[in-house]
Image (cartoon, grey):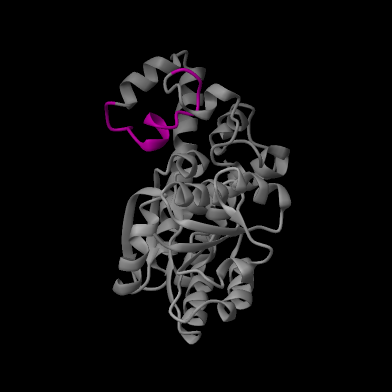
Amino acid sequence: MATIGFIGLGNMGGPMAGNLAKAGHRVLGFDIVPDNAAAAAALGVAVAGSGADAVKDADVVVTMLPAGKHVLAVWGEVLGAAKPGTLFIDSSTIDVESARKAHAMAAAAGMASVDAPVSGGVGGAQGATLTFMCGGTDDAFARAKPVLEAMGRKIVHCGAAGAGQAAKICNNMLLGISMIGTCEAFVLAEKLGLSHEALFDVSSTSSGQCWSLTSYCPVPGPVPASPANRAYAPGFAAALMLKDLSLSQDAAAAAGAATPLGAHAAELYAAYAEAGFGGTDFSGIVEFLRAGLPKGVSR
């Protein structure tokens, strides 16, 4: 078993660190929010007084932070406190450029590194069923995989430095688009007098089938586990979907890729968040569509 430093113990990071402790690893965690640290401590994580204290004896360091600027700042602070050869894993969802900068910082400090963003939301973090999309060298991935397996169900090596973030951005752009399409289909069905169950029964077994429909249905009833049955309490908040869609559009602009549906999905989720629903599950945008789009949003 390894000694693991874990920085960022929020809604995702706390349960992930807890699952590492549950698997038998010695986990030293740090978060600037005391309540997050206390919640992680209840899951078996030893709370460190600083990021440097969390990493100084670690074999592996995991970070789970809000944005690229936070990852670069934290890695800049703690790389010098870690033992030579420590493996650094970043599971935040950040832009590809920042991920590559983090890899370069780690290499300059004599550390191995993997970018390993996740899919699966808070439920996946709690249940250790996350999917990890990884970028880095073959050797770094081989070292990271046993650690990630304590927190997730599927671990995929997507390629070199930054490839994990690229995969996450592309995947979540597709998810945002498909959720809006699924919601539009249900709104149209309602207008045409078709029941939710009838549309679900047809589309879930025919050409309209997709994850947004069959696993995360945006209307109550057909999929009991979906947030639609809990007043859209967030499994994956709309504000986080907007963040990922914004990252996809930044990446598309940098790469010269045409993503018109991704751009429109970002516009719709921006309007949804600006209307005060950023903390609602992203599937709740179905209610926004029912009400009609606000002025200024293209149709």
x and y percentages locating residue 177 in the rendered image: 46, 44
Q: Residue furthest bottom?
A: 108
Camera-side residue of 34 and 68: 34
Q: Is residue 175 above or below residue 71?
A: above
x and y percentages locating residue 72 in the rendered image: 59, 73
Q: Which stretch is magenta?
A: 205-221
Q: Residue at x 45, y 37 (%)?
A: 181
Residue 200 position by quadrant? top left
Q: Residue furthest left?
A: 206
Q: Is residue 186 above or below residue 6?
A: above
x and y percentages locating residue 60 in the rendered image: 46, 67
Do we see residue 237 in this rendering? yes
Where's the C terminus, which quadrant? Answer: top right
Q: Is residue 113 left or right of residue 202?
A: right
Asked if the magenta segment contains residue 210, the reply would be: yes
Query: Secondary structure of the magenta portion, mostly?
Result: loop
Q: Is residue 115 left or right of residue 201?
A: right
Where's the N terminus, which quadrant? Answer: bottom left
Asked if the magenta segment contains residue 293, the reply would be: no
Q: Residue at x 45, y 28 (%)?
A: 217
Camera-side residue of 124 and 49: 49
Residue 205 position by quadrant? top left
**Total tally of numbered discs in the picture:** 0
Do we see residue 173 in this rendering? no
Camera-side residue of 85 and 63: 85
Q: Residue at x 34, y 60 (%)?
A: 145
Camera-side residue of 218 and 266: 218
x and y percentages locating residue 157 in the rendered image: 31, 63
